[in-house]
Image (spheres, rainbow, N blue to C red):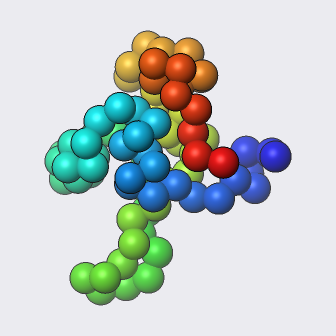
């Protein structure tokens, strides 16, 4: 599937891909660090999502790991 057509990932999926806790992602978002993210919907119940390509780009740029994921873990399908 082309990267532009991949469905957005949830924080739990990104956390699993990066082998970090969802709280780590929350802290990164508060500090403007980590993969690019966006919110779906508005208000306090808006859903945070990540574009898979942005997560892979973050891995390459900041974690120095190949596109195969962290510890060989693949992204969600």
Instruction: Place residue 7 in its image quadrant.
Output: bottom right
Rendering coords of residue 63 (x, y %): 38, 19
Instruction: Place residue 44 in its image quadrant.
Output: bottom left
Q: Which residue is depicted at the point 39% across and 65% down? A: 48
Give the answer, above or below, for where 40 lies relative to 77: below
Image label count: 0
Residue 57 appearing in the image: no
Q: Nearer the viewer, residue 66 or 57?
A: 66
Q: Is residue 51 left or right of residue 20?
A: right
Q: Which residue is depicted at the point 46% across and 18% down? A: 71
Rendering coords of residue 70 (x, y %): 46, 23
Give the answer, above or below, for where 32 lies relative to 58: below
Rendering coords of residue 16 (x, y %): 41, 40
Rendering coords of residue 10 (x, y %): 45, 58
Q: Which residue is depicted at the point 45% across and 49% down? A: 13
Q: Is residue 54 left or right of residue 12?
A: right
Give the answer, above or below, for where 43 lies relative to 4: below
Farthest right residue?
A: 1
Q: Which residue is depicted at the point 80% across and 45% down? A: 2
């Amino acid at each position: 599937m082309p990267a532009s057509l991949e469905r957005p990932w949830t924080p739990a999926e990104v956390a699993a891909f990066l082998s970090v806790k969802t709280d780590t992602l929350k802290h990164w978002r508060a500090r403007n660090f980590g993969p690019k993210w966006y919110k779906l919907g508005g208000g306090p119940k808006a859903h945070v999502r990540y574009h898979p390509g942005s997560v892979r780009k973050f891995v390459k740029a900041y974690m120095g790991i190949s596109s195969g994921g962290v510890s060989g873990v693949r992204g969600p399908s």
